[in-house]
Amino acid sequence: METNSKIVLAGVTALSCAFGALAEVPVVTSCSMSQAFNRIVTVKYAFADSSVPAVVTFDVKTNITGSVTANESDWVSVGGEKVCNASGAVWRRVTAADRGANGLYTIKWDPTLTLKNAEGEGFVIDAARAEVTAWPLDNTPDYMVVDLREGAVANSQYYYPAADFVPGGVTNRVYKTETLLMRKVMAKGVPWTMGSLSSEIGRNPQGVANEDAHLVTLTNNYYIGVYEFTQAQWQRVATNSVALSRFAGELKPQDCVSPNELRRTHDTTNKTRPTASGAYLDFTGPFYAHPAPDSLIGLLRLKTGLDFELPSEAQWEFAARAGHGNGMWGDGSSVVGAATDSNLDRLGWYGRGQNGETLDVGSFKPNSWGLYDMHGNVEEICLDWYEENIATATDTAGALYAGRVNIDPSDPSRCLSGQVQPQTRIVTRSGDFLNPASWCRSAARVSLPMRRKSCQVGFRVVCPAGLR
């Protein structure tokens, strides 16, 4: 057995992925793989039309028979964690500007860093092939990593097709401090039941709003934070803020931040806010619906070039359910208790009372879609104005809300129904460390004053799936 990883090449393939009737799909027309004496693997590929940009991912497969066969089921991935250190025209948006002098795109991979057996030794792969996957810009891969570090360049995010391709693994500290790890939620056109049935255990406890079941179909896919936004991430983005947390810790969720501080656009008493350049904008009319440039969401957009936002109620609940129905937690286990719940004990931090405090994000198991702390730890601020029962609420034209953001686009100081918000209250979801299990259910809804800062309240962010 060799002490350095080596791939003996015996077959190469290229793969272009498309998913339904999407935007123009880039096609990989050629792909070659070679290995130098120093073990570095070089992959060269081309597009049929280099004017069509794409997000590119990469994999290496080996044949379980030990030789090249035409049977596709004989080829298996060496594992995303083995190839995630590849660099070059991969894991990101690739354009014609990335082509070399020969018109080809290049990926470099050092297998000696990752392709090792249990004893830490390298080995020979007798039959291997490279797979280059081109993703259309309106259907980007499942995981996105956004850089928050000083000097980060806007629109420099990286994409990975599955959790095991994320460098260092999704639980790596860097995704809770220096970057944002986002998970794609395929919600577009999927009918689902929002709210809960009257038979659900713990339904409508004191302090939680009506949550009658109603049918919702969201119109777009989106990315949502794998974790609640942490204090370390806040410090990297909100450089103009002196926000303090009740429970200090880099990996703890950012608490004691008001909804108004996150966006500063529902604040009807002061519609003028400074931009990053020091100029002033008047937030009146339709533009009033956008986050202020000096708010957390505004600064996050400026830093990353992505349209970050707070999740709507419907986006949050769809992600929290993770494909599971009424009476279930996000991992598919049943809701079995109102005050305490043995199934929730695996998923979230709750019921600690006034002497409790938040824990580091990711301290419990994720839901079925790999999202952490969707139940408990801190309540998470949503975008919607609070309304008592959104299942039966209708807009000014008489149409049911049906999952739409409860903000009148023509007058953001009002609900879709036209109701004015004299108390300026918005929605929080997920429950928290202090309150019982019933508050942590996917359907539970709580209202929060716009200016209130509470150690029980934090947030996570969303952004559209796909690139402009």
Image (cartoon, rainbow, N blue to C red):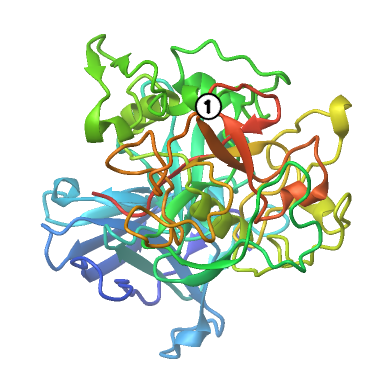
- Dot 1 falls on a residue whose secondary structure is loop
Q: How many marks?
A: 1
Q: In this view, does 170 lie to the left or right of 42?
A: right
* Residue 88 appears anywhere in the view: yes
* Residue 5 appears anywhere in the view: no
Q: In this view, does 276 lie to the left or right of 319?
A: left
Residue at position x 14%, y 68% in the image: 48
- What is the quadrant of residue 199 in the picture? bottom right
Seen from the viewer's position, the closer of residues 23 and 119 is: 23
Seen from the viewer's position, the closer of residues 251 and 202 is: 202
Q: In this view, does 268 lie above or below 118?
A: above
Residue at position x 30%, y 72% in the image: 18
Seen from the viewer's position, the closer of residues 338 and 63 is: 338
Seen from the viewer's position, the closer of residues 219 and 390 is: 390
Residue carrying label 1: 450
Q: Is residue 198 above or below residue 55?
A: below
Residue at position x 38%, y 27% in the image: 265
Q: Is residue 325 left or right of residue 222?
A: right
Which quadrant is the N terminus positioned in?
Answer: bottom right
Q: Position of residue 261 (x, y in %)?
A: 48, 22
| Amino acid type, residue under disc 1 in the picture | Met
Q: Is residue 268 above or below residue 365?
A: above
Residue at position x 37%, y 54% in the image: 465
Q: Where is residue 56 in the image (x, y as percent from the top left)?
A: 32, 57
